[in-house]
Amino acid sequence: MKAWWESLSRRERFLIAGGAVLALALLLHALAWQPFQASHRRLRQSVAEQRAELAAMRRTVEAIRRLEESGKAPTVADDRSLLTLVDQTARTAGLGAALKRVAPQGENRLGVQFDAVEFDRLVPWLGMLERDHRVAIVNLSVDRVAAGRVNARATVQGRRP
């Protein structure tokens, strides 16, 4: 290799060395700089999206605080116990056949178990509990058993109006 290099004219050596430097620069650009820039753009976009989401959350928190202070925050419409509320709303939502157990777990807290429940019915029911009845979902465990069906265990807690 050394003999080959020395057999080249000075101009050929300069062209080969320049080509090698250029190839190395292009390789560094393609393998290091370009992925770094793409990642940097994605992260900047993600930060912007998360800041916008945080601002929306802060506005929502302030709106909730104003509602609570004005006394217009949603409250439970009746005086049913948490056990009765969960049982009746589950049956109304068409989850009665899958509802296997509702058991107290301390003051104002229940464990709820569903077997082979339709996921598309379970999620709206949980949302309705939180939204309309001020029941917090403390813990939720969902395991898929078949297409569209899951076994679910939840711990729910009633909130004070």
Image (cartoon, rainbow, N blue to C red):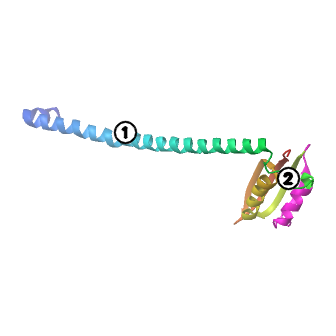
Return the residue at label 1.
32
* Left/right of residue 4 with respect to residue 127 in the rendered view: left
Q: Which SS class for mark 2?
A: loop
Instruction: Examine the structure image and report whether residue 97 is included in the region drawn in magenta.
Output: yes
Q: Which SS class for mark 1?
A: helix
Position in image of residue 148 (x %, y %): 70, 65
Which of the two residues, 78 or 107, is positioned nearer the viewer here?
A: 78
Amino acid type indicated by mark 2? Val
Which of the two residues, 98 or 48, is positioned nearer the viewer here?
A: 48
Quarter of the figure with residue 6: top left
Position in image of residue 17 (x %, y %): 17, 35
- Tell me where the magenta segment starts and ends, as one range: 84-107
In the picture shown, does residue 113 fall above or below 105?
below
Disc tally is: 2
Position in image of residue 155 (x %, y %): 82, 49
In the picture shown, does residue 48 fall above or below 89?
above
Q: How many C-alpha atoms fall within 10 Å of the one at disc 1: few (<14), some, or many (≥20)?
A: few
Return the residue at label 2.
76
Q: Mark 2 to mark 1: distance in Å?
A: 58 Å
Q: Residue at x 13, y 38 (%)?
A: 15
